[in-house]
Image (spheres, rainbow, N blue to C red):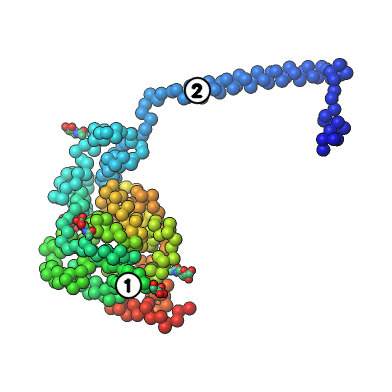
Amino acid sequence: MFPYTPSYPGFTVQRGGNMPVVRRKVTLLCMTLNIFFCLLMAISWSLRSDKSSSQKIRIPSTRFWRKLVPSKSFWNREQQYLDIIHNTNVNFVFSVSNPVTVLPDWLNDTGPTETCEPDYRVPIQISDYNSLPQRLRDFLLHMRCRTYPLLINQPYLCREKPFLLLVVKSMVPHFDRRQAIRETWGRAGMVANQTVATVFLLGNTIPLDHHPDLQRMLLHEETLHKDLLQWDYRDSFFNLTVKEVLFLEWFNQNCTQAKFVLKGDDDVFVNTLRIIEFLGNLSDSRARELFIGDVISNAGPHRNHKLKYFIPESFFEGKYPPYAGGGGYLYSGELASQLYSASQQVALFPIDDVYTGMCLKKLGVVPVKHPGFRTFGIEKKHRDNPCVYRSLMLVHSLTPQEMLSVWPWIIHPELDCQ
Ligand SMILES: *[C@@H]1O[C@H](CO)[C@@H](O)[C@H](O)[C@H]1NC(C)=O
Ligand SMILES: *[C@@H]1O[C@H](CO)[C@@H](O)[C@H](O)[C@H]1NC(C)=O
Ligand SMILES: *[C@@H]1O[C@H](CO)[C@@H](O)[C@H](O)[C@H]1NC(C)=O
Ligand SMILES: *[C@@H]1O[C@H](CO)[C@@H](O)[C@H](O)[C@H]1NC(C)=O
Ligand SMILES: *[C@@H]1O[C@H](CO)[C@@H](O)[C@H](O)[C@H]1NC(C)=O
């Protein structure tokens, strides 16, 4: 290309002396305009830099962080307190060396110091306390208690480093459900070449709930199977979160060797073989942060006081985080340990599934929906079809008798389900 440059029109050199008069005038005008524009630009530039430099050194006359306003709802206020003392509320600036001194006045004396006596400081902070359902009032009085005596322990349950720990939420009177689980999907030992351990979580029966005294029968069951964990607290629907937190604590102390955890109710049916196959297929990184189940997103509290899950505005405001609905979910042992520390920073909430979702949110973990979890059951027309159960991971709900009739469908290899 270069050899041709001289003949290229753009490169033709014109010497000033040879310019015609009209052209010279035009050139002059252009130069003037150029200077004018240069000046304009210089002025606007200096104006701009003036503005930005003044912005840099400006000191706000008011506080630039958002003032922490107490929530109108009790749970949210308890959580605000926990966020402050655990320094996780980014909107609130305080001295790390002595956080207590900067607690806002409205939190002083009302903070959730742990107590396991009925806490009568709570009712006076909830305007409609006296009109709340009894179970909610019971919950509120003990909301700040997370430690109950362990009556039956299994400190060596995880000595064999289980690949899968099956954790079943049960209740003392449900002897037949536990036995059906042991004989079917919850059989401990080697399953599909992996070590499986099973444990049942129990609270206590109390005279107030008119339970007959079953404790000695329970102790007998314990000597037979060595798979019970029992704590001394009232086993009720709104205390299931207590069960969850106590389990996480136990796991952290006695079972961190477990690679995966499946947590389920004692009326779910679990296809243990499929779960072990699924877990064996996972990559290491996916395995570590695993949390799957029948995940519900965009849910919020029920405000109808006739419903079992009723949560009043005076107690909780806001949406629920994504959570795995009742029945059961599958997650990694590593995550179980992290959930324990997260739970220390989340105020107890009466619905245990939602509570676990709140702890996951604290960890920045999003639970993943898996179609194999059927917590709302399966269609009636498919219920007697053995092959349907083969492809599922967890179904809610089955009676002990149904478990015993379905389990052979899972384990008999001769059944052709292609
Ligand atoms: C809380 O308030 C009481 C009086 O109401 C006061 O004596 C105490 O020092 C306050 N505590 C903190 C940590 O500010
Ligand atoms: C189980 O493990 C044994 C020995 O490690 C191996 O030979 C066998 O193929 C395994 N079976 C399955 C179903 O993976
Ligand atoms: C939870 O357990 C405690 C300790 O037994 C009991 O006092 C409280 O009433 C229970 N809460 C509910 C909601 O049943
Ligand atoms: C189980 O936990 C208890 C309480 O922390 C601890 O004392 C005990 O050593 C643990 N046992 C095992 C086998 O890890
Ligand atoms: C596990 O991987 C095998 C082979 O890729 C596949 O056939 C099977 O469906 C997978 N199992 C599960 C439960 O995902």
For the residue labelled by badge 2, is the local secondary structure a helix, a strand or a loop?
helix
Task: Give the residue drawn at x 24%, y 65%.
Answer: 157
The picture places residue 211, in percent across and down from the top left corner, at 14, 67
- Depicted 219 relative to depicted 12: above or below: below
- Residue 180: which quarter of the image? bottom left
The residue that mark 2 highlights is 53
The residue that mark 1 highlights is 190
Structural crowding at the residue carrying mark 1, measured as other residues with C-alpha within 10 Å and reported as few (<14), some (14–19) or many (≥20): few
- Amino acid type of disc 2? Ser
The picture places residue 200, in percent across and down from the top left corner, at 24, 66
Residue 215, numbered label = none
- Depicted 106 relative to depicted 389: above or below: above
Q: Quadrant of the N terminus?
A: top right
User: Marks 1/2: CA distance?
Assistant: 71 Å
For the residue labelled by badge 1, is the local secondary structure a helix, a strand or a loop?
strand
* Foreground residue among 108 and 190: 190
* Foreground residue among 155 and 172: 155
The picture places residue 17, in percent across and down from the top left corner, at 86, 16
Residue that sits furthest to the bottom in the current view: 414
- Residue 91: which quarter of the image? top left
- Residue 377 visible in image: no
Q: Earlier in the sequence, mark 1 or mark 2?
A: 2
Quarter of the displayed picture in which ligand 4 can be seen: bottom left
Task: Give the residue drawn at x 24%, y 38%.
Answer: 107
- Amino acid type of disc 1? Met
Q: Which tag is nearer the camera, tag 1 or tag 2?
A: 1
Question: In the visual, does 367 lie left or right of 223?
Answer: right
Label 1 C-beta lies within 8 Å of the nearest ligand 2 atom:
no
